[in-house]
Amino acid sequence: MSVQSKIVVFCGKGGVGKTTLSLALALKHARAGRKVVVVTSHPIPELAVSVSLEGLAASDPAAAANLFVVHFDPRDLLAELVRKNFPVEWVAKAVLDSHIYKSLIEVAPGLKEFYFLARLQQLAERKAKAHAAAPDFDLLFWDAPSMGHFLSTLHSARSFETFLSGPLAVAGADLAHFFSNTSRITVFPVATLEEMAVAETVEMCRALEKDYNLASAAVIMNMVSPLSKATDKQMAELRASASSSAVLRFALERAELERKRAAELLIGVSTRPVAVERVKGWRSDLDLLEEVGKSLQPLSEML
């Protein structure tokens, strides 16, 4: 098997903060001198609106030189494949504009997901120019799409190997073999401490372990309140003084609910928990990423 970048996957329900966590941990490693790339499920202009790296080149040029962010659109990848196989421009355009082609890429099961994973594999196995035997990136962070899409994407490689013949089956077998190297893949499920997010995260972790032999290295409980990490003694002391403060009573009720959800999550996934507190009052997105990165130190030590 080719030498490859270590792949770090942030996966979970939509809206739980996978993108921010991916960028925060990637930036942390880039500042430590490692060359990293983030593959995001968001188009770059959309990503820049939600979490911006603006100002990084000026404030930390070394980190900026080590950090890359890319987005793969499966439709663009398939169009690139067509142009490669039909080098005459008008022929390639005729294929891409045809109703048959447009229908095929939308209805063919797993086709777009398959080519996304193939490009992910190419990126992980890309060699550094100065060292032919070394990967181009030390770490590849995959900001995975929402849970159902993520699992169907992983399933696509196995489907192509099992149900097809010819070049696509060979490519599917190679892709399945690549993702079977679980020693090079670290999975970090992400959940907020809400009922639906916890239940879906437990279900996803079980599917990853059963179907793909991908055990979770740690589960991230994102955007928790400080009280969710308080000891039982501290909570008892706060409850004793809460009668005079409606705000404190509300905070304690929220914390109790979070603690209950955290217990349910840890029973379901049986792995190390890492709690990331909600950051308040940051001055810029870079400050936000730096603060989040501090909470991710336990994950950083695993890579």
Image (cartoon, rainbow, N blue to C red):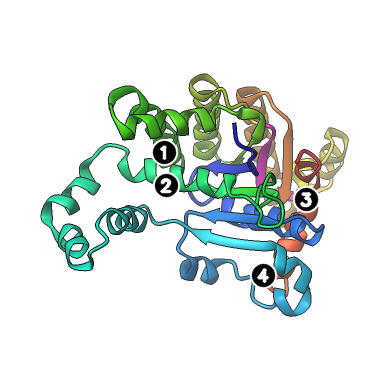
User: Which element type, helix, strand or loop, lies under badge 4?
Assistant: helix
Q: Which residue is mark 1?
A: 153
Of mark 2 and mark 4, the one earlier in the sequence is 2
Q: Which residue is mark 4?
A: 285
Given the image, on which type of amino acid does mark 1 rest?
A: Thr
Given the image, on which type of amino acid does mark 3 rest?
A: Ser
Give the answer, above or below, for where 83 lies relative to 126: below
Of mark 4 and mark 1, the one earlier in the sequence is 1
Can residue 38 be found in the magenta stretch? no
Quadrant of the image for the N terminus? top right
Where is residue 111 shown, x and y percent of the image?
31, 41
Q: Which mark is residue 295?
A: 3
Image point 75% across, 59% down: which residue? Answer: 30
User: Which element type, helix, strand or loop, lies under badge 3?
Assistant: helix
Where is residue 16 shown, x and y percent of the image?
56, 49
Magenta residues: mostly which secondary structure?
Answer: strand
Of mark 4 and mark 3, the one earlier in the sequence is 4
In this rendering, the label closer to the viewer, 1 or 2:
2
